[in-house]
Image (tube, grey):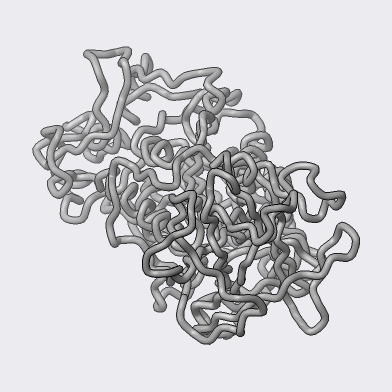
Amino acid sequence: MTALVVASGCTERDPGDETDGGTTTDGPATDGPMTDGTATAPTTDPPTTTDPSSDTEGTSGGPEPAPTVPIGSSVEADILFVVDNSLSMATRQAKLAAAMPAFVGALGGLDYRIGITTTDSGNPRCSADATGPERGELVLTSCLERVAAGEFEVPGILDDVSAACTAACALGDADLPIKPTATHASNGELAPRKWVEVQGESKISNLPDGVSPAQALQCFMPQGVTGCGFESHLESMFTALARTSDVGSASNFGFMRPQASLSVVLFSDETDCSPAPGFEEIFTNNKVFWEDPDAPAPTSAVCWNAGVRCEGPGPLYAGCSAENHDIQGDPGVSDDAAVLQPVSHYIDFLQAIEDQKRVFDSFAEVRMMMIAGVPPGYETHDSELVYEDAADPQVQLDFGIGHGCIDAESLGAVPPVREREVAEAFAVDENRDIFSICDSDYSAALAAIGTRIADQIRPGCMPLCVADLDPSSSVLEPNCQVFEVDAAAQTRVEVVKCEALGDVWTVPAGSTVCFAALIDQGGQTPSSGDDMSAECVAEGFNLEFQFIRNTAPPSGVTFEAVCAPSPNVSRDCPAL
């Protein structure tokens, strides 16, 4: 038996806030909750409403139908990893794989999906035959297969580094057959998917029996080192998510669920280099952004020079920020003249997804988190990024800036700017969502990321003040109907009330789901089963819903409630 609503920490980014980028229609389409269809007849008089801002009964026009309110009750989380698979990433991929048990453990009882793609979105300087760019396609194959394909060595440049895979992985694809599952968009069709999927507290997964999610991810995460060195973190993220609504994408379609939280985890030691269409010449014959215009080929410095602007004359800068440059190298140009995709393009895209999710849950959040070139302790403000030209001329030639951090093996990492600004646009509290790739162990970072994903799941507060049918009693007596909505199946079915067995709610015989109305704001009843969460009480609400199932939850299903709103808010919800 699985409770679908769990108490969790509240986030601090107001659900009405938008980022500076505004919104666009670029995001993948997700269906909103249905309010049409045949509902089961109510067992009490239908809830009605008066003006909720009034403290007295409405007197004009009679009562109006009560509003239908979506209840944020999902424990679903969709997680996309974008993994750098370029030359310098072998030891760091090994540490990423080693930290998977900590990450999975922090996700707790979430119903989660984890998809993986790479930072290789193609580039004119990188032969597609040599690098095989994923371009946002989800990848779910064991790294042992990539070892066999030679993707953990570059002859003449980098010796075999297959230990980045084999240190934590002993399972090949033959050991990891993916069980067929359905998605909210598959009309019940079962098929093996290109992601790891785990169903909440039941821990039922699409993995082979006897293989844990952590074990599988230790094999799936290492992506090799033959990817393009002009990493396009943001474009890979964009394409991966956009493909989730493309029925023609066999790898990605259906990955992102309408009501699930969305978290993107970028893992890279270089800055984003996502080119805008039509300006690929900056990597070939237009050398305006090259650190050395006399060189036969550009270095990664072209990415920094084309997408970043720093304050001051250097070598130590007051700060660095994303900047649009045109094909002549001039800064401050419009988005349509920028040679790299503007940061606003990606912020707007993610904001559109968040806005769509808020149709189901007004508190829904999209998060972008990173393990990147920041110093250890950056996430807790114990250290700060320093933007400074490199003292080593070769480092400056290679990257256009000094390292943001250097690890114990003397391997540096470029400080993030463009991708940092996207992550900051979706931050939800005082702590930063960016962790150091120079840490010797990523377990703490991945555990923190997993915890922040789990903390996005909120209790099912009824987000308006509900009328009390018996104001003389010490606790609320609400008049509500609750419905389960399946947008894909075009159904809206009334949910029965749960039965109380002591302090435990149970599903009545003949049903698969039920709801409990939690009304105790603090010691008002002897039972703990009707206790409201601290979050709902703190926000001033007087009702919370809990949903109980005795089967695995179907994908894409949401809940909505119709309750008679209070005609006297100051009496019924004094803290609201």
Q: Quadrant of the N terminus?
A: bottom right
Residue 281 relative to residue 300: left or right: left
Residue 414 relative to residue 297: left or right: right
Of residues 469 and 144, the one nearer the viewer is 469
Most distant residue in the left direction: 328
Query: Can you see residue 94?
Result: no
| Picture coordinates of residue 297, whole percent (x, y) | 25, 40
Q: Is residue 495 left or right of residue 466?
A: right
Q: Position of residue 247 (x, y in %)?
A: 41, 78
Vertical side of 180 occupied by 23: above or below = above
Q: Position of residue 119 (x, y in %)?
A: 43, 50
| 217 vs 173: above or below | above
Nearer to me, 100 or 95: 100
- Kindly give the residue lying farthest to the right in the view shown: 502
Question: On the rendered image, what quadrant is the C terminus found in?
Answer: top right
Q: Residue at x 28, y 48 (%)?
A: 22
The reply, left or right, for residue 430 in relation to residue 484 is: left
Residue nearer the viewer, 135 or 431: 431
Q: Position of residue 477 (x, y in %)?
A: 69, 60
Q: Nearer the viewer, residue 193 or 450?
A: 450
Tell me, yes or no, if residue 200 can be seen here: yes
